[in-house]
Amino acid sequence: MTEKKDLKSLRIVMIGPPGGGKGTQARILQESTGIPHISTGEIFRNYARSGTELGLKAKALMDQGLLVPDELTLEIIEDRLFGKVQDEKLGCILDGFPRTVPQAEVFEEILDRHDAKIDYVINIKVANDYIIERITGRFSCVKCGEMYHDSFKKPKIEGVCDVCGATKFVRRVDDTVEVVQNRLNKYRELTEPLLPFYDKRGLLHSVDGVGEIDDVAGFIAKVIGMK
Ligand code: AMP
């Protein structure tokens, strides 16, 4: 990346294993830059809650840690990025998409069609050992979505969200050891091949995701030219 783009218009792809801190970092980055954080998992979870036939189909796959079909995923992404939902000058922080090389290939075609491109791909590296503990301990505020963890990030006052003061929290139904293992296998098999794919295009920046949340955020800020 040589030319200087408006920060808010950057298109950033976050890659990393489930539970590796990708969502947390995407939220921090959204706060510090104003670039919208777009999580396909979150979109599908909302979709599933809608109770429509398609939503229920997506839910059945997600609950087992399986992927939602590409056709649906790609249609939703194109609509979210280039439909009427958001100001076309705004970029995106993609979290959970693309998930596979075929999705990334079709995504390149979608971007081309809209005369757009990816600016940075951030790879958050975390070894398998850390992940199970990280995922099975996580929960979030029902109201604002702030993420917490049984060991690493408890609310300052037990049972009360630090950000919005709400007192209800949820755990994802797919955050069990068995489902996490399945998602991890899927990640290593299907998503990791995206790393050489984006490295070849000169877009890949890798960071050690086992460090402090703020250190990882600092690295990402540096990559995109904020520091
Ligand atoms: P996540 O919140 O990113 O862990 O995603 C939760 C679930 O949503 C995944 O296990 C998949 O079932 C589904 N999902 C999210 N992103 C995608 C994607 N890009 N392609 C297919 N399925 C996805």
Image (cartoon, rainbow, N blue to C red):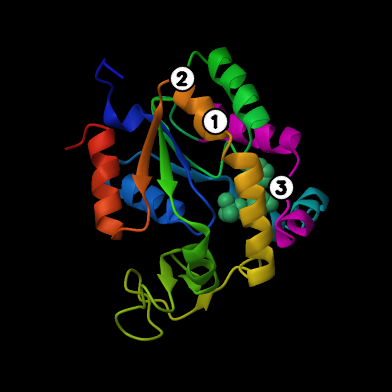
User: Is 101 on the left-hand or right-hand side of 67?
Assistant: left
**Where does the image place residue 173, in percent across and percent down from the top left?**
65, 69
**What residue do we see at 63% from left, 30% from top?**
101
The residue beneath circle 1 is 84
Task: Name which of mark 1 and mark 2 comes first in the sequence.
Answer: 1
SS of the residue at dot 3?
Answer: loop
Q: Estimate the spatial distance between the alpha carbons at disc 3 and disc 2, rounded to whole Å.
A: 25 Å
Ligand 1 within 8 Å of disc 3? The answer is yes
The residue beneath circle 2 is 201
* Location of the N terminus (image quadrant): top left
Based on the displayed image, in which of its 4 quarters is residue 63 positioned?
bottom right
Mark 2, Cα crowd under 10 Å, few <14 / some 14-19 / many 20+, is few
Task: Name which of mark 3 and mark 1 comes first in the sequence.
Answer: 3
Residue 40 visible in the displayed image: yes
The residue beneath circle 3 is 67
User: Are dots 1 and 2 in contact, CB under 8 Å?
Assistant: no
**What residue do we see at 46% from left, 56% from top?**
20
What amino acid does circle 2 point to?
Arg
Task: Name which of mark 3 and mark 2 comes first in the sequence.
Answer: 3
The answer to whether residue 105 is above or below residue 80 is: above
**Where does the image place residue 179, in percent across and percent down from the top left?**
68, 64
* Location of the C terminus (image quadrant): top left
Based on the displayed image, in which of its 4 quarters is residue 184 positioned?
bottom right
